[in-house]
Image (cartoon, rainbow, N blue to C red):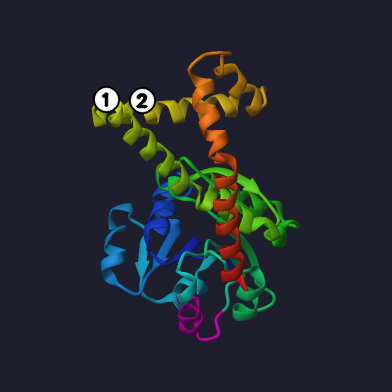
Amino acid sequence: MKKLYALGVIGCGFMARSILKGVTGSEFLRPKKVVVSDVTDEALDSVAELDVKCTTNNRYLVENSEYVLLAVKPQNFADVVKSLEGVSPDKVISIMAGVKRSKIKAALGRDVRVARCMPNLPCSIGSGVIGVDMTDFNANQKDIEFISGVLNCLGTVLSVREEKMDAVTGISGSGPAYVFMFIDSLIDAGIKQGLTRNEATILAVQTVMGSAEMVEHSDVPVPELIKRVCSKGGTTIEAVKVLEDKNFRGIVCAAVDACTKRSKELSE
């Protein structure tokens, strides 16, 4: 029997709201084909302007949605399962960090098909990157197109196997924090050299954005791009020497290692 809604979103936190705004704002889905649930009316009020259907009844949402997106905190997943009273969705899209597909199936039913995703903060402005494992849906192109369509509203979608999801977390899931720290450090350094905060912010932000675009659109390997900035006997090479002496690459690698390790621990 045809469902009332194409997409049901359980949870109405920051990332869920970003997804809802993305799918309705891009006209990928009409608002009337989307339903969202949360335990508080206050959270639901935050998406009232989107004209999506709102409910506090998870069972109603699951019974009437073709795809169910789990956007709750991992520690709240058990409460969601309990609220369903034995009702099980057919197709699930999960953005719960550290919760494996096997755990979701064990809780909801072995026949449930699950796409596991790892979005990041820039998804909130449509410029994110999302790692997703859609292995359970490989046999149905329509399902893959729908899930990809939802995620494409948020940014770039990268298909990966679930065993790589911890690494995705270490690079892109948590990566915005590393980039923010780098930008903030450049701003502080600029102020130290006599720039105003506004001047330093513009220079730092545009430099990071422009450099990222060059990497994205150039066929030149990143190490070669570094060499092109470093003229022999010039200014850049002196800065790069300091970064190398301080083991900049090693520090970044150690940070990603720590993040990935913690992601694996949370998924056990």
- Residue type, numbered disc 1: Leu
Numbered range of the magenta stretch:
76-87
Q: Which residue position holds label 1?
A: 195
Residue 107 against residue 190 in the figure, above or below: below
Front-lying residue, 198 or 20: 198
Label 1: how many Cα within 10 Å (few below 14, some 14–19, many 20+): some
The quarter of the picture where residue 107 lies is: bottom right
Q: Which residue position holds label 2?
A: 203
- Residue type, numbered disc 2: Leu
Indicate the position of residue 29 as horizontal and vertical percent values. 47, 50
Asked if the residue under mark 2 is in contact with the one under mark 1, i.e. CB atoms within 8 Å, the reply is: yes
CA gap, disc 1 to disc 2? 10 Å
Whether residue 123 is visible here, answered yes or no, is: no
Indicate the position of residue 239 as horizontal and vertical percent values. 49, 26
Q: Which mark is residue 33?
A: none
> From the viewer's perspective, is 200 left or right of 10?
left
> From the viewer's perspective, is 234 left or right of 110?
left
Front-lying residue, 132 or 192: 192
Q: Is residue 86 magenta?
A: yes
Whether residue 8 is visible here, answered yes or no, is: yes
Ranked by sequence position, the earlier of labels 1 and 2 is 1
